Amino acid sequence: MSSDDKMDRVFKALASRIRRELLDCLKDNPRTTGELCERFDTLDRCTVMQHLKVLERADLIIVQRKGRERWNHLNPLPIRHIQDRWIGPHADQAVTLLDRLKSDLEGTD
């Protein structure tokens, strides 16, 4: 799978508010699928599992089975790759432009 295909999966996964909320639940600690289903009690278990499957395919979560439990761990690396590839360079450029504008407005160099 190409790097672009992987990035497309990450963006697709992050496009859903529910999947972003699931990731938020995992940012501090891993959670079992049962715990996540309890937190998202307006969704049935199958729907939560479908969302988790999309996150797993995008490599945003790592699943670990312990007995009958399925533990979901956040994998922050794909998000970091987005930061490095897309957000960081654009933010740096925007900050440079704002700094130049500020200097121009203040009349300083």
Image (tube, rainbow, N blue to C red):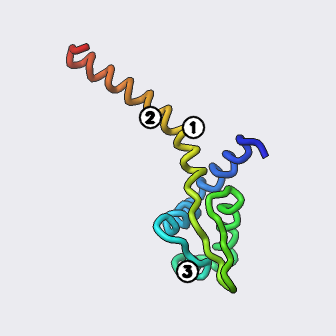
Which disc, if any, is residue 91? 2
Q: Residue at label 1?
A: 85
Q: Compute the Cα span from label 3 to label 2.
A: 36 Å
Characterize the local packing of mark 1: few (<14), some (14-19) or many (20 or more) Cα atoms within 10 angstroms. few
Front residue of this view, candidates 6 and 16: 6
Query: Residue 61: where, in percent of width, then height?
Result: 62, 63
Characterize the local packing of mark 2: few (<14), some (14-19) or many (20 or more) Cα atoms within 10 angstroms. few
Q: Secondary structure at mark 1?
A: helix
Outermost bottom residue: 68
Identify the mark nearer the N-term, 3 or 2.
3
Identify the mark nearer the N-term, 1 or 3.
3
Query: Residue 13: where, in percent of width, then height?
Result: 64, 56
Characterize the local packing of mark 3: few (<14), some (14-19) or many (20 or more) Cα atoms within 10 angstroms. few
Q: Compute the Cα span from label 1 to label 3.
A: 33 Å
Using the rendered view, name the quadrant where residue 48 is placed: bottom right
Identify the mark nearer the N-term, 1 or 2.
1
Q: Residue at label 3?
A: 35
Residue type at mark 3?
Glu
Which disc, if any, is residue 13? none
Front residue of this view, candidates 72 and 55: 72
Residue type at mark 2?
Ala
Query: Residue 72: where, in percent of width, then height?
Result: 61, 71
Residue at screen point 34% across, 26% down: 98
Q: Is residue 28 left or right of residue 65?
A: left
Q: Is residue 49 above or below residue 59?
A: below
Picture quarter with the C terminus: top left
Query: Residue 42: where, in percent of width, then height?
Result: 56, 78
